[in-house]
Image: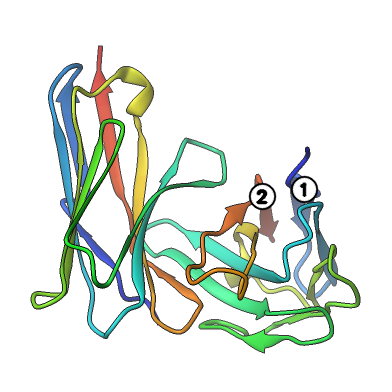
Amino acid sequence: SQQGEEDPQALSIQEGENATMNCSYKTSINNLQWYRQNSGRGLVHLILIRSNEREKHSGRLRVTLDTSKKSSSLLITASRAADTASYFCATDGNNRLAFGKGNQVVVIP
Amino acid sequence: TAGITQAPTSQILAAGRSMTLRCTQDMRHNAMYWYRQDLGLGLRLIHYSNTAGTTGKGEVPDGYSVSRANTDDFPLTLASAVPSQTSVYFCASSDFGSSDYNEQFFGPGTRLTVL
């Protein structure tokens, strides 16, 4: 069933600014993952955070997880035009992923 | 390395006709998945397979069938297509079981229009 729910749905920012996306879910999870989808392409895995972790970094990406609130956030720092894409959170609760509806991010050069 | 390939890239299909979407991976992943992506609904799981010879139903399995005769191939069949099956279909795979997480690798998608 669909668990992840991203907020906001669409974001337009200037190059160099930070972009933050949120995701909430309903049931217990093993981990939460974020994926990126460029227009007309398949999804690409960005970062995973386990249920016992609170924060994780990978390059310009920072993801947080609050299991008490059942929510996660993805921060992209110093955004670039190439970051223009849709971003999806996905929860892994029974070894199958449940994806949110996605955030569309447009980075204006 | 090709990763995951899907065929065809796109297809227009008359309602009532059957069609098989092909998916092949070369990563020797044991698990494979089929999703459909519709505007405003995100990705929804149709069917999955945790290992060759086994399959399972996802969130929206009706009207679709799958088979997993070997590790590499996971075809999705629409026996009698209906317009509501117009969507973009993604195949994915993962190395389920060998680690404690389930990162999935996606194919490029098949855009299907049923008229």
Residue A23 % position (x, y): 21, 61
Q: Mark 1 lies on which chain?
A: B
- Inspect this view and state whether residue A21 appears: yes
Question: Residue flagged by tag 1: what amino acid is it?
Answer: Thr
Q: How is the image coloured?
A: rainbow
* Residues at circles 2 and 1 in contact by the CB criterion of under 8 Å: yes
Quadrant position of residue A99: bottom left
Question: Residue flagged by tag 2: what amino acid is it?
Answer: Gly
Q: Which mark is residue B36?
A: none
Q: Which chain carries label 2?
A: B
- Judging by the rendered image, the residue that carries numbered circle 2 is B107
Residue B59 % position (x, y): 51, 83
Q: Residue drawn 19% across and 22% down? A: A78
* Marks 2/1 same chain: yes
Mark 2 or mark 1: name the one nearer the start of the chain.
Answer: 1
Question: Circle 1 sits in a helix, a strand or a loop, which is it?
Answer: strand
> On screen, A57 above or below B28?
above
Q: Nearer the viewer, residue B1 or A80?
A: B1
Quadrant position of residue B93: bottom right
Q: Which of A14 and B92 is in front in this view?
A: B92
- Judging by the rendered image, the residue that carries numbered circle 1 is B5
Tell me the quarter of the image containing the C terminus of chain A.
top left
- Inspect this view and state whether residue B62 appears: no
Q: Is residue B112 left or right of residue A61?
A: right
Q: Is residue B102 left or right of residue B71?
A: left
> On screen, A28 above or below B8?
below
